[in-house]
Image (spheres, rainbow, N blue to C red):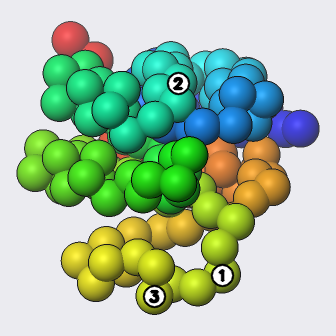
Amino acid sequence: MSNGPSDLGGLRVLLVEDNLLLAEVIADALATYGCVVVGPAPDVESGLQLAREAEFDGALLDINLFGDFCFPIAAVLTERKIPFLFLTGYDNSRLIPPEFRSARRLSKPIDPDALSSAISEHFRAPSVH
């Protein structure tokens, strides 16, 4: 695994993933890139709470969380103007509501370099005060 883009250092990333092993792997990759992981949240309820209350620069959302879809979380993030990426094993974009079909999707299993590139492209770096 590469060290990832240097512009990821300090980014706060919400991770919503129901597979605990995969969540750990992604969180470790994010930490390697210098990101601060918010979560991980394993289900829609805890993901919604963090999406509404936590401070972060972007989110990674597993589409299917124990049989429930993450789209209510995506709606909160859209309302808050926080960018997000979908993580999915599905090829069928029709599962995604029309209002979220333009969101970038990363296929599982997650490629660490593709993850770092996508985060670099879609999440804004925190401002330095």
Do the residues under discs 2 and 3 have CB atoms within 8 angstroms?
A: no
Furthest toward the left, the residue is 79
Closer to the camera in the image, 107 or 18: 18
Closer to the camera in the image, 73 or 29: 73
Q: CA distance from mark 2 to mark 3?
A: 26 Å
Could you say where residue 125 lies in the image, as x and y percent from the top left? 37, 35
Q: Residue at x 32, y 32 (%)?
A: 45
What residue is pinned by disc 1?
91
Closer to the camera in the image, 107 or 32: 107
Q: Secondary structure at mark 3?
A: helix
Q: Residue at x 62, y 62 (%)?
A: 88
Q: Amino acid at mark 3?
A: Arg
112 with respect to 83 (left or right):
right
Q: Residue at x 42, y 57 (%)?
A: 69
Q: CA distance from mark 3 to mark 1?
A: 9 Å
> Quadrant of the image for the N terminus?
top right
What residue is pinned by disc 2?
40
